[in-house]
Image: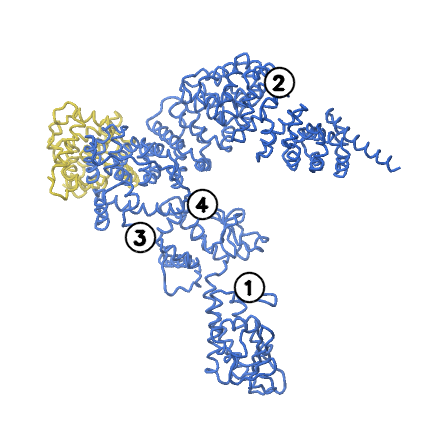
Chain colours: A blue, B yellow
Amino acid sequence: MGQTLTSAAHWTSAKEGRGGKLEFTQANEAILNKIIQFVEGFSGAHPEECNVIFQQALTWPTCLTPADLSGGYSQKGSETVSDAVTPNGVPFVTLKSAGKQNEICVMSFEHLEGILRASGDKKMSETRACLEHNPDPVAKMCGDRFATEREDTEIEDKKRNLRLVLLIKDFDDKLISEAIKHISSEVKLTPPEVDRMVKLLRDYSGDDEEKHVLEDISWMPPYTYVFENGCRAPPYRQLHGDISYIQAQPHDGDKMCITASTTGYFFNGAEGETYKDLVILLREKSPRFAELIDKQDLFKVRHTEDDNGLVVGSSHGHRDIDDEDDERQDNGNRAVQKAEDKKKVAEKKKQDQGRSKRLEPSFKWRVLNVHDAQDNKQEKQVVKAPPKKRKEILYSDGRSVKKAQHSDGEDSFEESTSESEEEEESPDRRQEANSDLPSEYWQIQKLVKYLKGGNQTATIIALCAMMDFNLTQETCQLAIRDVGGLEVLINLLDTDDIKCKIGSLKILKEISCNTQIRRAIADLGGLETMVKILRDPNKTLKTLAAETIANVAKFRRARRTVRRYQGIRKLVALLDCIPVVSGVRTTEQEKDVEVARSGALALWSCSKSTKNKQAMRRAGAIPLLAKLLKSTHENMLIPVVGTLQECATEPSYRLAIRTEGMIEDLVKNLKSENQELQMHCASAIFKCAEEQETRHLVRQYGGLDPLVTLLSQNDNKELLAAATGAIWKCSISPENVVRFQQLKAIELLVGLLNKQPEEVLVNVVGAIAELAKEPANRPLIKKAGGVPSLVQLLTGTNRALLVNVTKAVGQSAEDPDNMVMIDRLDGVRLLWSLLKNQNASVQASAAWALCPCIQNVKDSGEMVRSFVGGLELIVSLLKSDDREVLASICAAIASIAKDEENLAVITDHGVVPMLAHLTDTTDDQLRRHLAEAIARCCNWGDNRESFGREQAVASLVKYLKSEDISVHRSTARALHELSKDPDNCITMHEAGVVKPLLVLVGSHDEELQEAAAGCIANIRRLALANEKAQK
Amino acid sequence: MVGELMVSARREFHAVMMRCRKAVDRKNIHYVSKFEIECLLGLYKAACSKGKMDRNRFRDFLHREFSMTDDILMDRVFKAFDKDNDSLVGPSEWVEGLSILLRGNMEEKIQFCFDVYDLNSDGYISREEMFHMLKTSLVKPTSDEDPDEGIKDLVEVCIKKMDDDQDHRLSFKDFHAAVLREPLLIECFGPCLPADKDVKGFLEKLSVNSK
């Protein structure tokens, strides 16, 4: 038993210590049961050996009470002992009652058996306790090495002892071989095992999405060297159990980096689950892999009787194909067997469901309102239709089979997605059955009938006839859907006949302009097929498929589907055409360009999803787009630039657009004749110009001039919005502002302040705000008559607009002349009322704008007081959670507090404790304005003492450690003010203020010097006074 | 006797060869290389080793290489190949015909298809001819509908779509214009041109075989 107990049984972690416990696992329970059986049958089978007296009694705490032992037992004090005694006079069984815990000692198998019988249903726990306390029972029974060297031992005894030992050992062997079966299901990974698995999967990897389960699987470089023990992980990682590192590229999703360690497979870095099997891990992470591996019969779940799970496939040099198949099958079985039972059951159930589902009409059929009768008919066809070998397979057969399979796959997808799509589903408008149907309806119905029941010739005639209808008309589009034409059209895409595919796609392309049709196409799995067609060698087909995808992928779910089926990569591959710079293009080249254009068109639609943007980048779309951007054809440039501007919301794209030299082309196309193209270019620049270097590039390539020219495009609002946006972002750089000044942009922009839609206004005002940072521009705004319009806009509700307007007003208020005007127009009151806005950025922006207003207006104190409840409001905003708001409010308070009367009011509103409360912050901007506000607020009553009481002083001292010089300046000023109170001086001194202040005295900033020196002087003065007093 | 035949056959091949080369030079036929013509003739020779290229052999060939199945149309393709109406496809007819199937341009293909579809070679595709060709194109309706009704309807669809001069039959002009409007219509009465992949496969096989 020793062997089993130490190696097979599961011990809790405390095993090494005295109090090791057997875990309550199934395996342990099985072992215990076996032991009980063994012990119980012992006396019957081996009457002689059962009387062997143990060298040491087996002792364990027991739940048995003296009452449980009856017959042959007698009470001796607190002990219950058996009547039978060993030759040495020791009773065979001793039960000591020590309080609640009884302890039992047993000396022979016979009595062990008796005890077990007596314990009845507690057998298991007794055995458990016994083994827990006697981890090596054999040693106790027969003594160490069971070689009893006592002279008085007879030969006969020795023989009996030996037989007992042999018996136990025999049993132990049996036990361990059984236990190992269980353990093998949790066997630790070994390097050969990992090697084999990877090799196997590699055999099944490749480009073909139908045949290969993975695109690639390999050892992760640089860990490819195989150490002597078979591991590939570096030795120091081997200590942690790592065996090798694997990289796997599934058909969907990113490359996965997997660590194979002795405990199982898991993802690098991620603290996720550890999987016992690589296949299961991949299954979990890649739905495509799961789907494909299910198709590989070899991996299919199958239960076999004689599967003991211990077979480890040995690698023969040569193997028959059959052999190999067997092995794979074996492997597959084991793969599944190793999984937890639950998972297995669940998986099987799922498969079963899938199988049974195959013959049921899927959910989608119901969605599409196909009549049940039709369903049934098709189902029957599935069952009955024998495979026809001739070419004229009637499409309806293949169709229904395919559809059922499809719905199967789709269902499993739906399970794996958590994203809700409710907002996408629009109510379906369907024609009433009884309403008057247009004649087209009946004609289309007839044609669809021919599509369903015709060979390819009839199909082509029907398709061509269908194209004659006005497919842009909604009645026709919906008629096609309602008579079940979509299913047929989509199924045609799966046939071999290129003409049928082209015809079908031509119709799908037209009707997919309709949102309902788009959804229906996606529901029917049309995207999957179209994505497959993207690899077709026929260029016309590819172009049509990409164009249709461009139409369908206008909503989120469709975009996700395209990504799922690797559509992004395939679309990006379409972009790769040899650019023909000039001259005559052959028809083939023309077609290539057409393919690339359609690819860009589809990517444009797809790029509205963030994940697709990433997928495109990974697929290498950026350099290809850069190449296409050199094209001179507008119909090519529009989708390309459209895609770029869509993607430019991602910082990585912005960087790439700059580094790939696309800014130059964007600027060039800004001068194009085509307004749509101009719009997309301006929009791309708008998004990219977030970055300083891009702004410089735009200027260097002369992009600012055409942008300003575009301001005259008053009719095209989209273009105007994009252009003004680009000007806004570009004017963040002062160099660009100079150029804009030369181009008289500010006058033009002010001219646009009236009667524009909000999206234009936001950008115009943003641009004005940026341009007004340059003092020379501020009078220009007034001259152009912009101030009244700006103040007028303060009454708006658009959040983005308000943020920009307040900024613009704030900037122009820096100019005293403007301020007079703003004040006259009651702009300050409007700004103040915006502090009540719900949005934090509006609040902050309004508060910032108030600062210059308060500073520059004449008789500001009076003005501020005139706003009823205004001061209370501003103080209450110090409770905000937003740092920007807090900083701006502090700045505003600093301005307000210059007026003593107002300071008195805000003090009454409790500004001091609130400011003190904020001093813990680490945000430099907030620190700076907070210190400024504290400095200003000290000038009233006992505010200095109050700040001291509120423990603001020590925190302020810490600000001196900041690296921001403006924080130092305001902090020094605040400290100087605070140091006028002796208690604060003491606190500061204790907080170690002197040293940093001494450094600041050496600063080049005079104001800072003065404040620091003043503070030190105050501290010093206090110390002197103190000394004097002590004397 | 046999030797004489062989000699004459060889002579004929040579003549065809020369003619074809000239045609290639004039760009009347579309083989990239003279080598390809040789290959085609080699194939012809191999196919005719057990006799002449008659209707059945030719149909076998079409079925095998281009997966054509429609009996009526295969006959018509044979007729279109057999310019001199001797019920045999001679070597030059062979090369010229295959030139259209394998590398023909749009115009040639339109002409070829029209010839195939014009069953009685009267220069028009009549309603009856259409009906004849489309007879098998629809699955038989299960209900008690007139089985021909669907086909008649398809014919009407075709007439409506393609008959520009409204004389209830298709002239070459009608057909030509319709196909240019919508290229899919070129095989509107049944497959008589090989599919792209068959062409590709055939050409590959050709070059491999002759090597």
Q: What's the residue type where badge 4 is placed? A: Gln
Q: N-terminal of the two: label 4 or label 1?
A: 1
Query: Mark 2 = which residue?
Result: A857
Q: Which quarter shows the C terminus of chain A?
A: top right
Residue of label 3: A355
| Three-letter code, disc 1 | Thr
Task: Determine the secondary structure under disc 3.
Answer: helix
The residue that appears at 73% across and 27% down in the rendered structure is: A1008
Q: Residue furthest top?
A: A783
Kindly indicate the quadrant of the structure image that contains residue A870. Answer: top right
Q: Nearer the viewer, residue A159 or A486?
A: A486
Q: Which residue is mark 1?
A: A12
In terms of sequence position, does the residue under pointer 1 or pointer 2 come before the other?
Answer: 1
Decide if residue B18 is in sight here: yes
Give the x, y percent position of residue A430: 27, 35
Residue at disc 4, secondary structure: strand
Tell me whether marks 3 and 2 sit on the same chain: yes
Q: Nearer the viewer, residue B13 or A413?
A: A413
In the rendered image of this protein, does residue A121 appear above or below residue B42?
Answer: below
